[in-house]
Image (cartoon, rainbow, N blue to C red):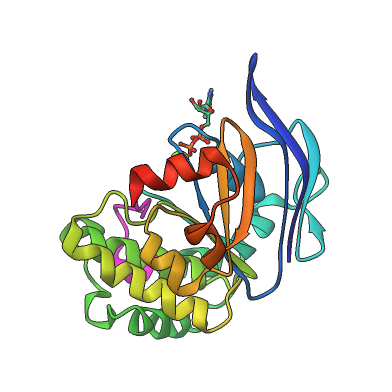
Amino acid sequence: MIEIEHVSKWFGDFQALKDCSLNVEQGEVVVVCGPSGSGKSTLIKCVNALEPVDEGRIVVNGIEVTTRRTNLPKVRAKIGMVFQHFELFPHKTVIENVTLGQIKVLNRSAEEAREKGEQLLERVGLADQAEKYPAALSGGQKQRVAIARALAMDPVAMLFDEPTSALDPEMISEVLDVMVQLAQEGMTMIVVTHEMGFASKVAQRVVFMDQGEIVEVQETDRFFKRPETDRAQYFLSRIL
Ligand code: ADP
Ligand code: MG
C-alpha cells in the first residue's frame, strides 16, 4: 500500500533523510519511533507529499506521490494525516470541519457530506459536539475531530505524527482508543508515536529512526524484547 524506496532529502546542506526504504502492506500498522530530530515527521510528510523528496520515490496505493504530474490535493486527501497540533479550521464548526473537504475536494453534495460527517462524529464519540467551534473543545476532542475529518475523505491509509504528545495525560487514551479501533478495522497506518503500549497492542512492526536513517525495522514483540542495534536499545532504555 505504501512503498518508500531509497528516499533521501536535504534541507540546504543538512541531510534529513538518508536512503530510507520501507514497505507497508495493506491493513498493516507500523509505528515509527526515534529521538527528536531523527526525521520521523519529515518522512511521513514526504509520504503525503507535504515535503518533496530529493532522491528516491514513494508510491501509495499504486500512485507515485513523488512526481510533479500527480494531482496533489486529491492524493493528499486520500492519505489522511493527523498532526501533533490539531489543525482544525478555527472559524468553522466541528461538522463544517468534517464536511468542507468532502465538498471541495471530492465534490460531494452538502447533504451527502453531512451524512458522512455525522456518522464519523458518532464513531469518534462526538455526535453531540457537531455545532460547536474548535475553541470550545478539549484537546482530546479536537484531535478526534481531526481524525474524523481525515476519515471523511475515505483515505486509503492514515498517517499520524505524534497525535497524543500535545495532550494532557487524561485525554491520551480517548484518542488512542479511536486509533486502536481504526487499526482493528484494517486501516493501513503509519504512526509516529512514543506510546509503546499502543505499539504493542496494534502495530505489526516498529521502525526505529536515528539521524535521518531507518536504523531498524522489527516485528513489534521482537523490537521490545531484543532490539538489534545498540542505538535502538539505548533509545528504548530511555523511554520505557
Ligand atoms: P523528528 O520528527 O524525528 O523530530 P523532523 O523530521 O522534524 O524530526 O526533523 C529532522 C531534522 O530535519 C531536524 O534536524 C530538523 O531540524 C530538520 N528540519 C525539519 N524540517 C526542516 C525545515 N523545514 N528546514 C530545515 N530543517 C528542517
Ligand atoms: Mg516530529
Image quarter for ligand 2: top left
Please report the residue visible at 37 percent of the width from the left and 83 percent of the height from the top.
123
User: Overall secondary structure of the magenta stretch?
Assistant: loop
Asked if residue 88 is among those painted magenta in the image, a careful observer would answer: yes
Q: Which residue appears at 48% of the width and 73% of the height?
A: 202
- 114 or 11, nearer to the observer: 11
Q: Is residue 203 in the magenta section?
A: no
Image label count: 0
Q: Give the farthest residue toward the top.
A: 13
Looking at the picture, tell me which residue is in the foreground, 233 or 181: 233
- Indicate whether 75 appears above or below 121: above
Residue 223 seen in this snapshot: yes
On screen, residue 237 above or below 147: above
Q: Tell me: residue 150, above or below residue 76.
A: below
Residue 176, given in percent of the width and then of the height, sits at: 35, 69
Q: Residue at x 69, y 73 (%)?
A: 26
Q: Quadrant of residue 77?
A: bottom right
For the N terminus, the image quarter is bottom right
User: Can you say whether 74 is above or below 13 in the image?
Assistant: below
Instruction: Indicate left or right for 231 with 196 as reference.
Output: right
Asked if one can make out residue 49 in the rendered structure from this viewpoint, the answer is no
- Front residue of this view, candidates 61 and 205: 205
Q: Residue at x 55, y 78 (%)?
A: 109
Q: Which residues are magenta?
A: 85-97
- Residue 124: percent from the left, percent from the top? 34, 78
The percent coordinates of residue 101 (x first, y second) are 52, 63
